[in-house]
Amino acid sequence: MPLVEETSLLEDSSVTLPVVIIGYRPYLSSEAIHPNTILHSKLEEARHLSIVDQDLEYLSEGLEGRSSNPVAVLFDTLLHPDADFGYDYPSVLHWKLERHHYIPHLVLGKGPPGGAWHNMEGSMLTISFGNWMELPGLKFKDWMSSKRRNLKADRVLPEEVARYYKHYVKAMGLQKNFRENTHITSVSRLYRGPDGSDGQDRDVAAQRLQIEKSKFTRRNWEIRGYQRVADGSHAPFCLFAENVALATGTLDSPAHLQIEGEDFPFVFHSMPEFGAAVSKGKLRGKVDPVLIVGSGLTAADAVLCAYNSNIPVIHVFRRRATDPSLIFKQLPKKLYPEYHKVYHMMCTQSYSADSNLLSDYTSFPEHHVLSFKSDMKCILQSVSGLKKIFKLSAAVVLIGSHPNLSFLKEQGCYLGHNSSQPITCKGNPVEIDPYTYECVQEAHLFALGPLVGDNFVRFLKGGALGVTRCLATRQKKKHLFVERGDGVA
């Protein structure tokens, strides 16, 4: 549905969008007993209230998990109690559709619902279990059964996750809230406070007029962009919103080594690019090895892709193979045998000056790439300074990625813990209030998911809870002001 069809409607301030929220709300199930007795006792104190209406800081206190965000840990333990200890306890929550809590919203995305899952390498299994990917009201296993496919293993293919999310939007009747093929070019502040401080887009008089016109929903944000329509043309749009939630992920811009020759066409920077080259047979029969740079799971995926296609691999990474911080150390062998196979090769098939490259795979721990040459050669350097030159058939640099926040001022850097550096998932996430997910540096702007350090879907859902709790509380206060005739909340 083209956004341009709504242009005339959006000129009226009454349809300025408050934010992205759905009317499903979680409650403690009547028969539920959480294995954490302290948490269960807290939940019993307000059993009649939705989790959205409870004190998230109080409920989160003392909980530990694999996220640095306390609400993410809380919501995860409510949905998957003691999951990190290997248990498969049922969720202690049940969901109610309460339409009176619905908040008008719009979700803008470059592609279909499911985002980056649609672009991931199809032959690799997910890190997380299938049930950790599911959303409220539709169990992943039930959806798989409806497709006449059995969930034979706990881990699933990215393609299945992408289809599940796309189906979820239809099953829940949310199509009208989603706009695909949209590209955001600008998200800018329209109003910054009664004192007019930092007002960059309106003078004080215009700001006051804007508040008066918009009644009880402030046009805090102006969102500009375009939507790619069926004939390939671009339809520009301009929306206004009281609140904006950033959920872009961090896969937009692959990280680069910033070295000579990195822009040559034989150097790839994403797993989909490399996977496509392999599947199309572009590297079939090549004698020269593929160079893979990186020590994370995406680099391991590339190693497996090449190895399983009988393409020889040179695997370069800066750390020692025995470094305890490598992600492989955190994955149980029984659940992730393919990644432990890669890790075993990293440790046992490393290069030595006394031997040549191995026929299938050779690792280069504590090495980095100095440069790529036009004749498809690369220069590697060890931690001791020794240099080596190898002829390649291709190179794949998989050392992480960064979000594209070009639509924000300063590329969004001012939102990070270190405002002088770009936003990254691990090193410099967006600084947020830990219980509301509102940006510390920008009121009415929220961030969740990888932007705040939560790479896994199971923890991203806690961000949605935090945002919902914050906005529901503000909406209640606003309604009280309206009922009393006190003016704008």
Image: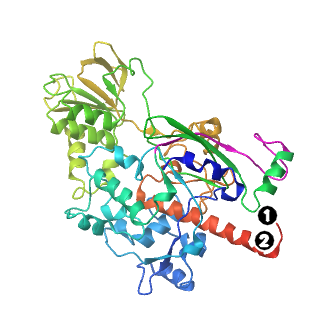
Residues 385 and 79: in front is 79
The magenta segment: 181-204
Q: Tell me the number on the disc at residue 488.
A: 1
Residue occupying the far top of the picture: 375
Mark 2 is on which residue type? Phe
> Do the numbered discs 2 and 1 sit on residues whose CB atoms are within 8 Å?
yes
Residue 153 in the image: x percent, y percent?
21, 61
Identify which residue, 101 or 198, lies in the foreground: 101
Q: Is residue 363 visible?
A: no
**248 within the magenta span:** no
In this view, the residue in front, 309 or 43, is: 309
Residue 89: give x, y in percent of width and height: 34, 75
Left or right: 297 as drawn, with respect to 205: left
Residue 255 occupies which quadrant of the picture? top left
**Which residue is farthest bottom?**
31
Identify the image quadrant of residue 435.
Answer: bottom right
Q: Tag 1's secondary structure?
A: loop
Left or right: 238, with 263 as reference point? right
In the rendered image of this protein, does residue 323 appear above or below residue 28? Answer: above
Residue in the foreground of this view, choosing between 447 and 10 = 10
Q: Name the residue tied to disc 2.
A: 481
- Residue shown at 35% from the left, 19% from the top: 264
Label at residue 209? none
SS type, badge 2: helix
Q: Would residue 204 be visible to someone looking at this image?
A: yes
What x and y, as percent, mark residue 412? 61, 40
Please state the horizontal and vertical placement of residue 192, each as a whole percent of the image: 76, 49
Alpha-carbon neighbours of circle 1 within 10 Å: few (<14), some, or many (≥20)?
some
The quadrant of the rendering that contains the C terminus is bottom right
| Measured Cα–Cα span from mark 2 to mark 1 | 7 Å
